[in-house]
Amino acid sequence: MLALMSDALLSWLAFDPVLTAVEVVATLAFALSGLVAAVRKGMDAVGVCMVAGLTAFGGGTLRDVLLDRRPFFWVEHWEWLWVLLALTAAALVFLRRRHLSPTLRAIQWPDAIGLGLFAASGAQVALSQGLPGIVCALMGMITAVFGGVLRDIVCNEIPSAFSDHQPYAVCAFAGGWVLVGAQALNAPGWLALVVAAGTATGLRAAAMVTGITLPQWGGKRP
Amino acid sequence: MLALMSDALLSWLAFDPVLTAVEVVATLAFALSGLVAAVRKGMDAVGVCMVAGLTAFGGGTLRDVLLDRRPFFWVEHWEWLWVLLALTAAALVFLRRRHLSPTLRAIQWPDAIGLGLFAASGAQVALSQGLPGIVCALMGMITAVFGGVLRDIVCNEIPSAFSDHQPYAVCAFAGGWVLVGAQALNAPGWLALVVAAGTATGLRAAAMVTGITLPQWGGKRP
Amino acid sequence: MLALMSDALLSWLAFDPVLTAVEVVATLAFALSGLVAAVRKGMDAVGVCMVAGLTAFGGGTLRDVLLDRRPFFWVEHWEWLWVLLALTAAALVFLRRRHLSPTLRAIQWPDAIGLGLFAASGAQVALSQGLPGIVCALMGMITAVFGGVLRDIVCNEIPSAFSDHQPYAVCAFAGGWVLVGAQALNAPGWLALVVAAGTATGLRAAAMVTGITLPQWGGKRP
């Protein structure tokens, strides 16, 4: 029943014009981070398009494979695949090498918003399957972070989420826990989602502003 | 009904001796490209065998995981696993370092045939699940190309399909679209498969003969 | 019926205190090998924790995705996720750079035990689905070895299981075949598991003691 209500809520939220706009911006930020990484590696148009798509949809797809859910987001909303093709074509025409760094800087903020949104919605999906709290928080983190992890693996790099010593995945993990906690306190679904996404995005924003880093090991810094 | 007929057709095609021979040659070409890549990286017999298998069956397995289909090709036709072991053993005995480059050149043409076959059959499988056209074309491309992508990831390289600026994945994508279009025009199933596979293989062959390259980015060439 | 009995047996074995202790030590050995690899790559606390978890649970999770089984081990026994967090926190406090090599040496033996356990149980799971012998042996090998393969891919290395010329995956594969053979001979389930795990662990131990290597190729050694 709770799961049904959550699904209904998610469907409703999906039609909310403000939330839809936020989601579009966040997804485009994820896709752009993949696009820039692929261009930097000297990939061709096909590779750039694939890496952009993998970054934008890889996290949610991995979550759905793990939770055995179908259809995937990009199968249900296949219009997004055309958006990706158009994005790649536009980048082919307009993107110059000197634009890459400014693009990455510009998408930091929408990327932080996407981190929160995807962490909250990913944890919500796991929670609606009745999974334990830590698994839900982990699924939120996987949804938000593993698109970037797959991007870095395909680009033949150690995933930056695992090695750049900036709080990123840990913010998503915290947001997932907030969602679990809010639902345990019987908060309304929309409130739980907003507070959880806000927590993850807020923590990430605070980390970006303060430049705080994760604890160091004896090991060398990257 | 259409799906049932397609399945029946695929079953029938699977017993056609000419098509079976073509499939065997194409699958061996994929396996050999993995084998050569692994030998070049100095892998041991186990690694060579695993990478050959991953290249030959990885694309179709990934498609089936995404489409939630079981059993996999190599579970249903497990004789192929013995073929892989025999292939690795034969390579261990007969393959010399000076054979590697001629092997890669020799398998270019059966590889192009495999690209067409797997793109058409992969798109057909997605179409029989009633998925949208662009998703079917993408699944055809994943079937044909992601074996090689996984090969390159395991070999710690940027996937050549994404970065060598030669038309490869895009030929498979085009073949997938031809299959979608032919079925939309109510072409008989066998004709759709033949035309789609022929389109992908033909485009790839044309690209190999003409040496045409994908559009460049401002970025450095690999 | 056989499958049901095996499941019952596995459930019973899971409560056997000796076997549980062996499993815990083996799983911790796998997690520690991931932890050390991640620390060596200069990863941060998040990356170290993720790679440790991927190494410990990646092989079994991949097997379950391929066999379409749910819930995963770490979803059903989510307490292990807390163990991983605690392990990472303890390593953050106590692990020094000079401890890394001794740690790897110390876990060689529990790692060999884990190789045998996971190969036998992985093959058993596939056998209980009625899959062919070679597929069962392969699933045992994937369960035992692919955690380490995923670890090396995320660490941006060629998987050591494919390239270090030491018998490792091949021991797991042999153990899987022993389980298949024992069940074909109608051996009791517990005996099949013990003999299969013992074979894989014994072969691995013999390889470590004798320093025997896999056949060389013409190619360069790593």
Image (cartoon, coloured by chain):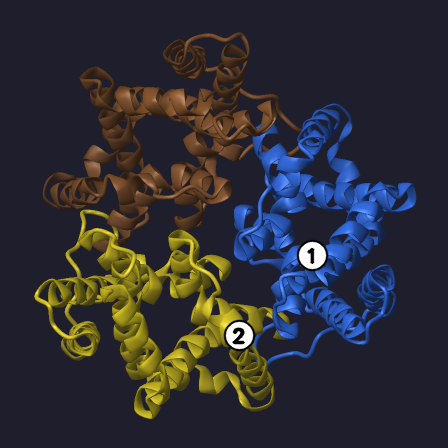
Chain colours: A brown, B yellow, C blue
Q: Secondary structure at mark 1?
A: helix
- Counting from the top left corner in percent of width and height, residue A25 is at 23, 25
Residue visible at 40% across and 14% down in the picture: A189
Q: Disc 2 and disc 1: Cα gap in Å? A: 23 Å
The image quadrant where one finds the N terminus of chain A is top left
Where is mark 1, residue-wise? C144
Q: Which image quadrant is residue C141 in?
A: bottom right
Height in image: C204 above or below A149?
below
Q: Which mark is residue B39?
A: 2
Question: From where the camera sits, is residue B144 visible?
Answer: yes
- Counting from the top left corner in percent of width and height, residue B87 is at 54, 84
- Counting from the top left corner in percent of width and height, residue C137 is at 67, 68
Q: Residue C96 or B47: which is nearer the viewer?
A: B47
The three-letter amino acid code for the residue at tag 1 is: Ala
Q: Residue A5 or B30: which is nearer the viewer?
A: A5
Return the chain for callout 2: B
Return the chain for callout 1: C
